[in-house]
Image (spheres, grey):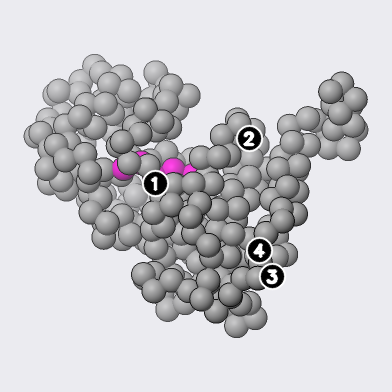
Amino acid sequence: YFHIEQLAIKFFGCLLKCSTEFEIFKLIHKPNALLNHDSETASTNTTSTIIDEKYHYELVPDISEDERYFHTEFSDQPLPLSDAIVLINIATFVKEHKWYEMLNHLDISSKGEHFILYQYSENNLYPTIISSALIQTTSNKHEWLFFDDFFQNTKWKPNLETDGLLSLTKATSMTPLTRSQFIDKTSNEIENDLFYSILDKTKICEAIRLTISGSKSKANYHLYLAQKGLAMALKESGRDVVFTIIEKPAMVLFYKAMNL
């Protein structure tokens, strides 16, 4: 192990960067049944919804059981949907943002319900993934990152505007909310109060690990399409309230500008 660490430092700078590249290598060079794959049927899903002419979005109940192949900007060859999403997560969150903690939890991105946004091109038999996000139901709330201590901070000042609380109350069936009941409470306490105020837990979910791929010139446009597609897909599936973690300031400002 010491010899491996020495080589990792020599060629990659540190063991974490080496591990990241190794995970990417394993995915790209993983044996698969692409040669025996029927591209005409495997790339098409009649349940997808078209947004802005050439972009499709959908909710996939369990990506580990989906047999379709997709292109990504991080691999020359198409990969099974599950592997493609894991690759995108590693390339964006781990390699680009250096969130090496995710290396121990890559399996979360390889299964379960996911939102995907993708587009077809004339040159490729397989569509290209533009965006993906993991959707978690309340049945596994104990695994939600939203309520994890890692994503809590005592210095945060909650936004408790009356209009926001009213719109949240109207969005779904829940116990009436007032600003006074949240005064002097921590963000963690407020978030748990909001969660347990919602009467029908089937109408809420967590959406995390939102990725955006594609050319830099279209980054903001793809982010807009992903947000719009994700909101529409979740609403169409009966979800009224979404708990999420946002790290992009532009997205926070986007929602703030929309207000209600």
- Number of marks in the image? 4
Foreground mark, 1 or 3? 3
Between discs 2 and 3, the one toward the N terminus: 3
Which label's residue is closer to the chain start, 1 or 3? 3
Q: Nearer the viewer, mark 1 or mark 4?
A: 4
Secondary structure, magenta segment, majority class: strand
Q: Is residue 83 visible?
A: yes
Spatial separation of the CA atoms under disc 1 and disc 3: 31 Å
**Nearest-to-viewer mark from 4 and 2:** 4
What is the C-alpha distance between the residues marked 4 and 3?
A: 6 Å
Q: Is residue 162 visible?
A: no
Q: Nearer the viewer, residue 45 or 189?
A: 45
Mark-to-mark CA distance, 1 and 2: 19 Å
Label number found at residue 135: 1
Tell me the distance, in whole angstroms, between the alpha carbons under discs 4 and 2: 26 Å
> Label 2 neighbourhood size at 10 Å, few (<14), some (14-19), many (20+)?
some
The magenta span reads 205-210
The answer to whether residue 71 is above or below residue 187 is below
- Are the residues tagged 1 and 2 within 8 Å (C-beta)? no
Rendered residue at 39%/18% (across/down)? 154
Residue designated by label 2: 103
Structural crowding at the residue carrying mark 1, measured as other residues with C-alpha within 10 Å and reported as few (<14), some (14–19) or many (≥20): many
Choose top left, top right, bottom left or bottom right for residue 208. top left
Q: Residue furthest bottom?
A: 122
Within-10-Å neighbours for mark 4: few <14, some 14–19, many 20+? few
**Residue denoted by label 3:** 35
Percent position of residue 28, x then y: 72, 54
Residue type for callout 4: Ala
At mark 2, the secondary structure is: helix
Residue 63 lies, with reference to residue 55, above or below; the image says: above
Q: Nearer the viewer, residue 243 or 254?
A: 243
Instruction: Tell me the tag on residue 86.
Output: none
